Image (cartoon, rainbow, N blue to C red):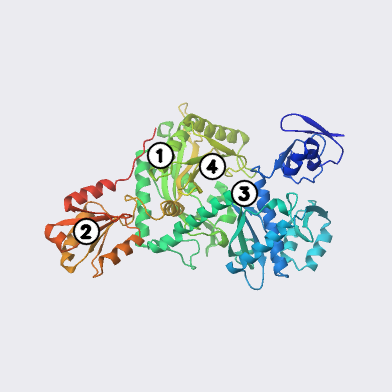
Amino acid sequence: MIHVQLPDGASRALSPSSTAADLAAAISPSLAKKTVAAVVDGQLRDLTAPLSDGAAVELVTRDDPRALELIRHDLAHVLAEAVQALWPGTKTAIGPAIEHGFYYDFERETPFTPEDLPRIETKMREIIAARRPFICEEWQRDYAHKHFEAAGETYKLALLAAIPAGEPVTIYKQGEWLDLCRGPHMRHTGDAGGAFKLTHVAGAYWRGDSKNTMLSRIYGVAFADHAALDAHLTMMAEAEKRDHRRLGREMNLFHFEEVAPGSVFWHPRGWRLFQTLIGYMRSRQEAAGYVEVNSPDIMDRALWETSGHWQNYRENMFLAKTEDDRDYALKPMNCPGHMLIYGQGVKSYRDLPLKLAEFGKVHRYEPSGALHGLLRVRSFTQDDAHIYCTPEQLTDECLKVNDLVLSIYRDFGFEDVHIKLSTRPENRIGSDDSWDRSEAALRTALDKAGHPYTIFEGEGAFYGPKLEYVLRDAIGRDWQCGTLQVDFNLPERFGTTYVAPSGDKLPPVMLHRALFGSLERFTGILIEHHSGHLPLWLAPVQAVVATITGAADQWAVDVAKALREAGLRIETDLRNEKIGYNVREHALKKVPVQIALGAREAEAQTVTLRRHGTDATETLALHDAVAALVQASQPPRSGTR
C-alpha cells in the first residue's frame, strides 16, 4: 500500500500505482465525476499520473480557478486538431494557454483569415462533443523524431530537439490526433467546455525572430462558463473602441513607421500631452526632494560589464561596434549612468538620502511580434530615479516612494491599485544576506503602509527584489506600471561609498524607482482608460476657438491670445465651415472645450463655451471664461505622508 496526504491533513491508503483518479473515486463517486486534475506535491498533474508514497495530493475540480489554465490549454490542442482536420497538411508550431485564452501557430500556404474562424469553431465544438480522452504517452526520442519527420512537422522536430537530453518526451493523444506536449491536460476534450470564442488571426514569426518564417496565429478566448465569457467579450468590444492606436490617429497624436519599429513619431498634439506628463511628474518629484540629472544614451561595454547587464541582459540590448573596435550599448536602463554621477565627489551620511531623477530615453530589444503601439515599444522614456540612502533610512524611503506612487495614480483617476512583491530569481547577483535585507525592507514598508500585496516568488530583477504597481482601468483591465527595487549589489560593484558617522566608508543602499514606468506606455493606458476624453488639465488642446462668420475672426484671435497668455493650450479654427461640421470634427479629436464666436459674440466681447459630451452652451464675458478655464485646468494634487 501507499499513503497520500490530503489538504485537511488526513492520510489515505491506496494500492500501489494508484492515480489521482483512483483517489477521487475512493473518496466519493460524485467527487470523481467533478475532478479533472490534481495538484501533487505542489505541481498540477494529470489525473492518470501514478501517485508516489507520501505524496501531498489536492484534487482539482473544473470550477476550481486552477483548472482555467487547463481549459485553455486543452482548447489549444482542440484548435490544432480542428485546423488539421479541415486543412490536411497544415503544419503546427506551438499552442499555449495565455491570459484570457489561448492561441496556436500554423504554417499554411494561404494564411488564415477571419472568415475561416466560424468554420474552425464549429469543428472544435464537434471534437469537444466527442469527449475524446487525453492520453499521455512517453516516447523514445528517436521514435518521436521519425514520427514528426514522416508527418512533415518541421516545427515539432525543432521543439523536440530543444528538449534537454535525459528529459522525457511526452505525447498527448486525443483520439487519432496527437501533439508533443509537457501537459498536463484534463480527462477528455469534453472538459474544455463550450465557453470559448476564436477572436482573430495574426502573423507571428517562428520563435519571435523576424529572420524566421512568418506563421499564421489563431487566437481564442476561453473561460469556465458562458457568463464569464460574455463579460469578457463585452470588455473586448469596449477595449476595441478605446484602442489607443485608433484614438491616436483620430486625435492626431502619434504614428509609427517601419523604418523605426517600436519607436514613436510624436505629432504636435501628442508631444504636448507627453510634455504635460513630464511637467506634472517633475513638479511632484521636486516637491518630494528629487534632483534631476541626465546621462548619456550610449556607453562603453565596460560600464555594462561592471553593472552586470552585459552578462545578464545583453540579449535585450542594442549593441554597436565603432571603427576603433570598441563595443558600446544603447542604454536599456539609467542606473549605471546614475552610479557614475553619484560617484563624483565624496558623499557623507549627511548628504543622504540623495534622490537622482531622470527622464531618460532607454532602448530595449523587443521581438517584432511583441510590439504593440505605445504599450510595447523598443525606445521609451522612463521617469526613472535612484535613491541612495543608509540602511537605517531604507524602510522609510521605501514607504515614501509607496505613498508617492499611490497618490500620483489617484491624480490620474486610478484608485484600484494592486501591489506585487517579486522576490529573488534563480539568475541573480549578490549574496543571500543582501537579498534577505532587501526583501525584508520592502515587506516592512508595505506592512507599515497597510496596503495589501501579493508575493511572486522568483520574479525579482537579477540585482534585487521589487514592488510592481498594477493599475486597474475603467473597464477592468490590469496594467503593470510603477516599480520599486532595492539594490545592495550595484553600489558594491561600482565601489561607491558614503562616509558614515564613524568615519568608515560604506556602500549606500540603492533604490531603483519608476512611477509611470514607461511614459509612452502610460500615455497609451491613459488614452484607453479615458477613451480619449482626457481631463482638461491633461488634454493636449484644452480648447479650440472657432468662428461662425468671418466677421468674428479678429475677436477669435484676441480670445485665443488671452487664453494662451493665461497658460492654456489653445488652437484656433477660422475656416468658413458650418458650425455643426466644426463641432463634430473637434469632438472626434476629443477637444474638451469648444469656443464658438459669431457676430453677436464679437460685438458684445463675449464667448460661447460648449464642453465635450454635452449640447449645452454657456455665454460668458472673456475674463470670466478665462478664469473658469484656468481654474478647471489645474492639475490635481493628492496628499502624501
Q: Residue furthest bottom?
A: 109
- Where is residue 63? Give x, y as percent: 66, 43
Viewer-side residue, 222 vs 320 = 222
Which is more toward the observer, 286 or 344?
A: 286
Residue 528 makes an appearance in the image = yes
Query: Disc 2 or disc 4, which is closer to the eye?
Result: 2
Q: Name the kind of residue labelled 2 in the image.
A: Ala
Residue 273 image point, x, y percent: 36, 55
Q: Residues within 10 Å of mark 2 (few under 14, many from 20)?
A: many
Query: How many other residues sit within 10 Å of disc 1, few (<14), some (14-19) or many (≥20)?
Result: some
What residue appears at the point 70 percent right and 68 percent down from the top-left corner? Answer: 86
The amino acid type of the residue labelled 3 equals Asp
Element assignment for label 3? loop
Q: Amino acid at mark 1?
A: Ser
The CA span between labels 2 and 4 is 52 Å
The residue singled out by tag 2 in the image is 560
Identify the residue shown where x is 68% and y is 59%: 125
Query: Could you tell whether 152 is left or right of 366 in the image?
Result: right
Disc 4 vs disc 1: which is toward the camera? 1
Numbered disc total: 4
Q: Position of residue 434 (x, y in %)?
A: 58, 35
In front: label 3 or label 2: 3
Quadrant where the N terminus sits is: top right
- Residue linked to disc 1: 407
Q: Do residues under tags 3 and 2 come within 8 Å of each other at their CB atoms?
A: no
Marks 3/1 in contact by CB < 8 Å: the verdict is: no
Q: Residue at x 17, y 64 (%)?
A: 552
Nearer to me, 354 or 87: 87
Query: Dot 4 corresponds to which residue?
Result: 490
